[in-house]
Image: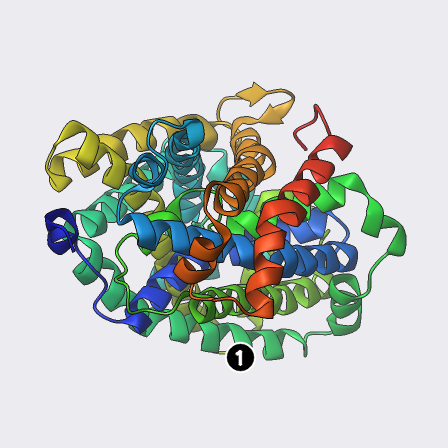
């Protein structure tokens, strides 16, 4: 081990690493974005394509990111500089940093909404919503000029605080307790949601595919973007986290656990949300507000609903925080090395800039009509990252793993070895994943939708 490696922070245990990756993967993507995207893209068909993509493209690329990160023991740009000096692969590193920036800018806006709801339940404000009209409550809140930005600011400040505390203390500790708790609450709530009268329609919507939509380029691209977003793929996070991993940890099982658990959380939150959507006569394709307009109706029915609502939004906030921490970490790890600044200085500067970049996303929800290419600013940033930057990042990572490494080394460094799984994996990253992503793109070319 060279000096740099010895001085690098490392995960306390293998479980700590898996939990941190899970903490990164499981977030608003699984609950807020999954329900929005599944709702807008027809439910069942979307789900099938999404799961296929996770399995065939997602998991192999997760393993590639882990392998690159652990081998290089560096940040996302440094990793490519180190493993392929003087070659253009490091463009991927810069893309990862840029994507982390963009995603966190609007992610913190939504996380701010989650915090507002948490406090709404703690203080009882949501109990007093006139006529239980949660749709108006939500739209009038996000349409305000200042309040959502203040929540976004508070959320970014917390993210900055955790990232300053460093890798182990900050991220590992909280995840060990809160992630399992969120899982349990989601399961309990989804069982309850099935009793509300919309079970049949909700489950049909989520699980029964409209076969025509299965081949709809829009649905396929949306599923690809969602798979990458949810797995934290193509944004440099898993390379950065792999960089804090020492040699003795095994990668394939870690990739599998992260992929399976992440997708399970998405499906369970679908089982919670869609039956409720139908039970309360809402429209599944009503966009980014779906969770915020639907779930308060569910909590309203429960006798200890205020408490359960508070707990739910608290855990969702915690999941969002561990994801946002991972996004900020990507950028900070790079700039810390590049600028030779302290962790604290770098985190405050970068976190501050990301906060500013997020403000137009917040204002575009009603206060000031900021649109790009016919979409409100938040939706534009979301689709730019999900439908363009992340899949593109995936292509580069897969090609890098498949072609810039010798096959034997790739198999050894990924811990797969010269097994049949290893050989399948290598051909997926060499050809199948990049080709599949390119075909999906070409199908949809010129349109970010
Ligand atoms: N993967 C996370 C999520 O699904 C973030 C990092 C985008 O919320």
Quick check: can you spot residue 89? yes
In front of the other: 279 or 105: 105
Percent across and percent down for residue 349 are: 20, 30
Looking at the rendering, in which quadrant would you find the C terminus? top right
Across and down, in percent, residue 23 comes to: 38, 61
Q: Is residue 109 above or below residue 283?
A: above
Which residue is pictured at 58% across the width and 44% down the height? Answer: 288
Count of marks overlaid on the render: 1
Position in image of residue 332 (x %, y %): 25, 39
Is 145 situated left or right of 435 in this image? left
Q: Nearer the viewer, residue 423 or 163?
A: 423
Q: Quadrant of residue 119?
A: bottom left
Quarter of the image where the N terminus is located: bottom left
- Label 1 CB sits under 8 Å from any ligand 1 atom: no
Residue 434, placed above or below residue 186 = above
Residue 265 located left or right of residue 249: right
Q: Can residue 134 be seen from the camera position used here?
A: no
In percent of width and height, residue 210 lies at: 86, 56
Report whether 382 appears left or right of 440: left
Front in this rendered view, residue 16 or 362: 16
Name the residue that disc number 1 marks: 188
Residue shown at the point (33%, 27%) measured from the top left: 356
Whether residue 69 sits left or right of residue 220 in the image: it is: left
Per the image, label 1 sits on a secondary structure element best described as helix
Density class for disc 1 (Cα within 10 Å; few <14, some 14-19, many ≥20) is: few
Q: What's the colour scheme?
A: rainbow
Residue placed at 56% from the left, 29% from the top? 380
């Amino acid at each position: 081990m060279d000096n740099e490696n010895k001085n690098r922070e490392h995960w306390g245990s293998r479980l700590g690493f898996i939990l941190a990756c899970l903490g990164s993967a499981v977030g608003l993507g699984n609950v807020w974005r999954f329900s929005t995207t599944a709702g807008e893209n027809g439910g069942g068909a979307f789900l099938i394509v999404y799961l296929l993509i996770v399995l065939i493209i997602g998991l192999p690329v997760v393993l590639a990111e882990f392998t690159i990160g652990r081998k290089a023991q560096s940040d996302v740009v440094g990793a490519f500089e180190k493993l392929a000096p003087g070659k253009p692969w490091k463009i991927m590193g810069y893309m990862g940093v840029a994507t982390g920036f963009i995603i966190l800018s609007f992610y913190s806006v939504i996380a701010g909404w989650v915090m507002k709801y948490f406090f709404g339940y703690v203080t009882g404000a949501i109990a007093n919503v006139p006529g239980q009209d949660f749709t108006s409550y939500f739209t009038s809140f996000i349409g305000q000029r200042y309040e959502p930005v203040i929540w976004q600011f508070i959320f970014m400040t917390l993210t900055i605080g955790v990232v300053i505390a460093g890798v182990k203390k900050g991220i590992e500790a909280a995840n060990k307790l809160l992630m399992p708790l969120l899982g349990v609450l989601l399961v309990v709530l989804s069982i309850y949601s099935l009793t509300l009268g919309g079970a049949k329609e909700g489950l049909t919507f989520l699980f029964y595919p409209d076969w025509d939509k299965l081949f709809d380029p829009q649905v396929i691209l949306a599923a690809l973007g969602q798979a990458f977003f949810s797995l934290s793929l193509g944004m440099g996070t898993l390379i950065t986290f792999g960089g804090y991993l020492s040699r003795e940890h095994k990668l394939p099982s870690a990739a599998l656990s992260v992929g399976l658990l992440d997708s399970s959380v998405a499906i369970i939150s679908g089982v919670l949300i869609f039956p409720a959507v139908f039970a309360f006569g809402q429209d599944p394709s009503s966009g980014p507000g779906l969770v915020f307009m639907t779930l308060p109706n569910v909590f309203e029915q429960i006798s200890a609903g205020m408490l359960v609502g508070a707990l739910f939004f608290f855990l969702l906030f915690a999941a969002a925080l561990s994801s946002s921490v991972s996004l900020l970490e990507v950028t900070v790890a790079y700039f810390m090395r590049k600028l030779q600044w302290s962790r604290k200085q770098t985190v405050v500067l970068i976190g501050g800039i990301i906060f500013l970049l997020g403000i137009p996303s917040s204002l575009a929800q009603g206060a000031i009509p900021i649109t790009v290419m016919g979409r409100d600013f938040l939706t534009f940033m979301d689709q730019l990252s999900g439908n363009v930057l992340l899949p593109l990042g995936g292509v580069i990572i897969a090609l890098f793993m498949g072609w810039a490494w010798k096959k034997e080394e790739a198999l050894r460094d990924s811990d797969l070895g010269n097994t049949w799984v290893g050989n399948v994996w290598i051909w997926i990253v060499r050809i199948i994943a990049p080709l599949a992503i390119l075909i999906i793109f070409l199908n949809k070319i010129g349109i970010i939708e």
